[in-house]
Image (spheres, rainbow, N blue to C red):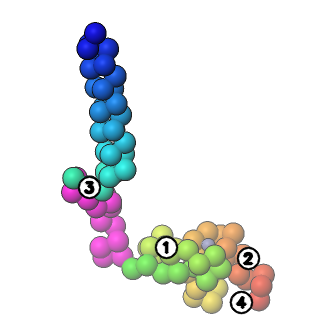
Amino acid sequence: MGLIRLLILGTLVWLLVRLVKGLLGPAQGRTPRRPASGGELRGGELVQDPQCGVYIPKETALKGPGGQLFCSPECRDAYRNQGG
Ligand SMILES: [Zn+2]
C-alpha cells in the first residue's frame, strides 16, 4: 500500500517545513516592527540615576538634595546615605 508511505512522507515533509520555519524565525519574511512607544520620550530627556544607573525620563525623576535625579526614593536615600 502506498497510502501509508505517502502519509509518512507527508508527515516528514511537514516536520521539515516546520523545522525550517522555526530556524528562520520571525525575523525572516516579516518586516521588523518597531517597539510601540507612547512617544513620551520625544520631548522628554533621559537622565541616569546615579545610584542604580537606570535611565529615567527627566519629568518623572525624583530630584535629590544635590540636584541629582533618581528613579525612586529608595535610590535617593541610598545615594544620600553613601554621602554622595
Ligand atoms: Zn534608581
The mark nearer the N terminus, 4 or 2, is 2
Local packing at callout 3 (Cα closer than 10 Å; few below 14, some 14-19, many 20+) is few
Amino acid type of the residue tagged 2 in the rendering: Ala
Query: What residue sits 73% from the left and 83% below the top?
Result: 80
Label 1 residue near ligand 1, CB within 8 Å: yes
SS of the residue at dot 4? loop
Measured as percent of width and height from the top left, residue 30 is found at: 22, 52
Q: Nearer the viewer, mark 4 or mark 3?
A: 3
SS of the residue at dot 3? loop
Residue 59 appears in the picture as rendered: yes
Measured as percent of width and height from the top left, residue 49 is found at: 57, 79
Measured as percent of width and height from the top left, residue 20 is found at: 32, 46
Measured as percent of width and height from the top left, residue 40 is found at: 34, 67
Task: Indicate whether residue 67 is drawn in magenta.
Answer: no
Q: Quadrant of the C terminus?
A: bottom right
Drawn side of residue 22 relative to residue 28, left or right: right
The mark nearer the N terminus, 1 or 3, is 3
Residue 70, numbered circle: none
User: In the picture shown, does residue 47 fall above or below 11?
Assistant: below
Badge 1 is on which residue?
56
Query: What residue sits 30% from the left and 39% below the top?
Result: 17
Report the Cα–Cα distance between label 4 and label 3.
Answer: 49 Å
Q: For residue 16, what is the image quadrant?
A: top left
Badge 2 is on which residue?
78
